[in-house]
């Protein structure tokens, strides 16, 4: 998401803009850089026209917009934290300069002890250095996530199913996936056959994605563009927690896995098999 432009800013609309407002903004901006107007040799205008088209396509589709907004809000939150740290660092620097100024004035009038002035200066410099280190850490973390694509928002999963095949309720589907990790966001599409699933831990999403073929009735893919090679290969196995479904009375505790399991892949497959068996038992009980 960090490498993706801010579509709302690009179109000059608010984050809660209606589809009509988005379309109007697109027409006004696209007209200025349309290839028919500026000519095919203006590469900068062509690039802007393509970006505007990408933005209106994304924000005009409710499902795509919901997925984009998750990533967009995460980026805005990160930028806000960095801005706050920058402000605190400036305040610390101003405070240091004020302390030194007051200290020097006092030294002139009251022959202030030179050691006290040095102490004030060192204290201010120390606090300023700590603040700068914290800001740098935030920026390095953001840079690392941009370069590796390992940000949490990049691990949002798109889950689709056929309502004619899957008779399980939305709450039961969410409960089933929550056994593999704590869910941060679970957004369901208008037709109820698609959901955006965002775990708090990226490793939990990786686990589901690697075993997506085991969920025969569900189509699982990444919500944001990712290369297959970027998927982590060494992630700690999920530890499903016991979550009782209030409507069915069944527990989602899948029980212990046999010690004879020879590999991590076997462990994962056995875990998923038992999860599906529990889900079927829960569905039968409701019927």
Image: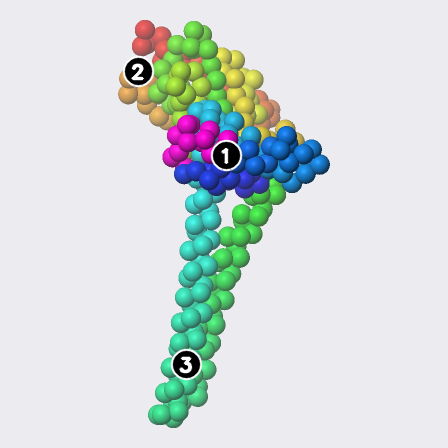
Q: Say whether disc 2 or disc 3 marks the residue closer to the N-terminus.
A: 3
Q: Which residue is mark 1?
A: 28
C-alpha span from label 1 to label 2: 54 Å
C-alpha span from label 1 to label 3: 54 Å
Look at 49% across and 16% down and name the residue there: 218
For label 2, the SS is: loop
Look at 50% across and 34% down and name the residue there: 28
Q: Which residue is mark 3?
A: 101
* Observer-nearest of 27 and 109: 27
For label 1, the SS is: helix
User: Where is residue 76 shown, x and y percent of the image?
Assistant: 45, 44
* Observer-nearest of 171 and 49: 49
- Give the class, few, some or many, for how many residues have Cα within 10 Å of label 3's Cα (few <14, many ≥20): few
C-alpha span from label 2 to label 3: 70 Å
Magenta stretch prevailing secondary structure: helix
Task: Say left or right for 112 vs 137.
Answer: left
Is 24 included in the stretch rendered in magenta? Answer: yes
Is 84 included in the stretch rendered in magenta? Answer: no
Q: Is residue 224 visible?
A: yes
Q: Is residue 254 visible?
A: no
User: Where is residue 174 shown, x and y percent of the image?
Assistant: 39, 23
User: Where is residue 144 shown, x and y percent of the image?
Assistant: 58, 46
* Observer-nearest of 271 and 107: 107
* Label disc, if present, on residue 248 of the rendered structure: 2
Magenta segment? 15-28
The reply to whether dot 2 and dot 3 touch (C-beta < 8 Å) is: no
User: Where is residue 145 shown, x and y percent of the image?
Assistant: 56, 43
Look at 39% across and 10% down and name the residue there: 167
């Amino acid at each position: 998401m960090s490498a993706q432009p801010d579509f709302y800013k690009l179109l000059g609309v608010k984050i809660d803009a209606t589809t009509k407002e988005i379309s109007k903004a697109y027409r006004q901006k696209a007209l200025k850089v349309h290839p028919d107007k500026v000519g095919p040799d203006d590469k900068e205008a062509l690039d802007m026209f393509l970006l505007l088209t990408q933005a209106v396509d994304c924000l005009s589709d409710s499902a795509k917009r919901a997925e984009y907004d998750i990533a967009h809000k995460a980026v805005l939150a990160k930028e806000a934290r960095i801005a706050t740290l920058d402000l605190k660092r400036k305040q610390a620097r101003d405070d240091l300069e004020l302390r030194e100024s007051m200290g020097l004035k006092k030294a002139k009038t009251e022959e202030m002890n030179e050691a006290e002035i040095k102490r004030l200066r060192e204290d201010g410099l120390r606090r300023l250095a700590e603040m700068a280190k914290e800001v740098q850490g935030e920026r390095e973390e953001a840079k690392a996530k941009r370069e590796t694509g390992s940000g949490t928002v990049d691990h949002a999963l798109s889950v689709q199913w056929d309502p004619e095949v899957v008779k399980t309720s939305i709450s039961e589907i969410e409960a089933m996936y929550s056994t593999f990790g704590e869910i941060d966001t679970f957004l369901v599409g208008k037709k109820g056959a698609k959901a955006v699933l965002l775990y708090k831990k990226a490793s939990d999403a990786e686990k589901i994605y690697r075993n997506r073929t085991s969920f025969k009735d569900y189509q699982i893919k990444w919500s944001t563009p990712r290369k297959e090679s970027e998927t982590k290969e060494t992630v700690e196995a999920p530890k499903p927690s016991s979550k009782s479904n209030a409507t069915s009375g069944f527990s989602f505790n899948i029980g212990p896995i046999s010690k004879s399991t020879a590999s991590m892949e076997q462990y994962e497959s056995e875990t998923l098999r038992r999860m599906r068996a529990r889900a079927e038992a829960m569905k039968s009980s409701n019927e």
